[in-house]
Amino acid sequence: MGEGPAALLWDVDGTLAETEANGHRRAFNQAFAEEGLPWRWDGPTYQRLLAISGGRERMAAYLTTMEGQPPAPERLQRLQRRKQQHYADLIGTGQLPLRPGVERLIREAHQAGLRQGIVTTSSRSAVEALAATTLGDLANAFAFWICGEDVSTKKPDPEGYLLAVQRLGLPPQRLLVLEDSAQGLAAASAAGLACLITLSAQSALEPPEHFFAARAVVDGLGTNTAASTVRRGPPCPQGMVTLSYLQCLLPQP
């Protein structure tokens, strides 16, 4: 077997934590209510809107469809600020914990000397809220964050991952991406990076063919009490995604 990964690149929403339906969606709805807008995104509506990468872009597209014209920039900015504050408040209540196995794998990688980074379409304020509460001391394991404001085009464009490769200064074949969505997988693949898909509550509803480019597809990272199921890819001993398992996902010379 070849060398293991030298660095891990983590997506946030759906990968580190199940933040979409009970976090971002609720925050959007609270922002709409405060603005006196009549719309409330239910689960199926939000699932469809997830095809649009980025919260600001999601709101802009929806308002354009509902009102027949793009929203004024200042109005969109006000809605985004309200939404971000509501999301931070939800995170602060502890209602959006890390997904099972995430803490274990981050610590294992950190102790092994692997560099780790975050590459997300979310705003820096959203990641800061997650870091201050849900991540806690685990935030120190990440060498950098690449957030929505740091790129000109969000996933599925590879810009964020290409920027991460540049910052790491490591061979792309030694890097592994952890994602939950088809957009994230497309971004990683376009950057020439191997990707493990850990299906979230939302992405588990997508057709399996959306994830054919992944090195493996699992339903989670696994814990001592909740084994991970491999949907596609190498068998996972004891149902737990470890650094040894990640090693077999990298391209071998």
Image (cartoon, rainbow, N blue to C red):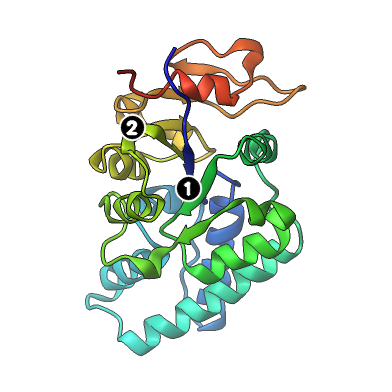
**Nearer to me, 95 or 193:** 193
- Dot 2: few (<14), some (14–19), or many (≥20) neighbours within 10 Å? some
Residue 138 can be seen in this image: yes
Please say if 176 is above or below 148. above
Q: Position of residue 1 (x, y in %)?
A: 44, 12
* Position of residue 47 in the picture relative to residue 229 (left or right): left
What amino acid is at disc 2? Gln
Task: Residue 173: give its label.
Answer: 2
Q: Position of residue 81 (x, y in %)?
A: 51, 80
Task: Residue 125: give its label.
Answer: none
**Nearer to me, 5 or 215:** 5
Q: Residue at x 50, y 33 (%)?
A: 199
What amino acid is at disc 1? Asp
Task: Residue 11: give its label.
Answer: 1
Q: Position of residue 184 (x, y in %)?
A: 36, 44
Residue 95 can be seen in this image: no
**Nearer to me, 109 or 35:** 109
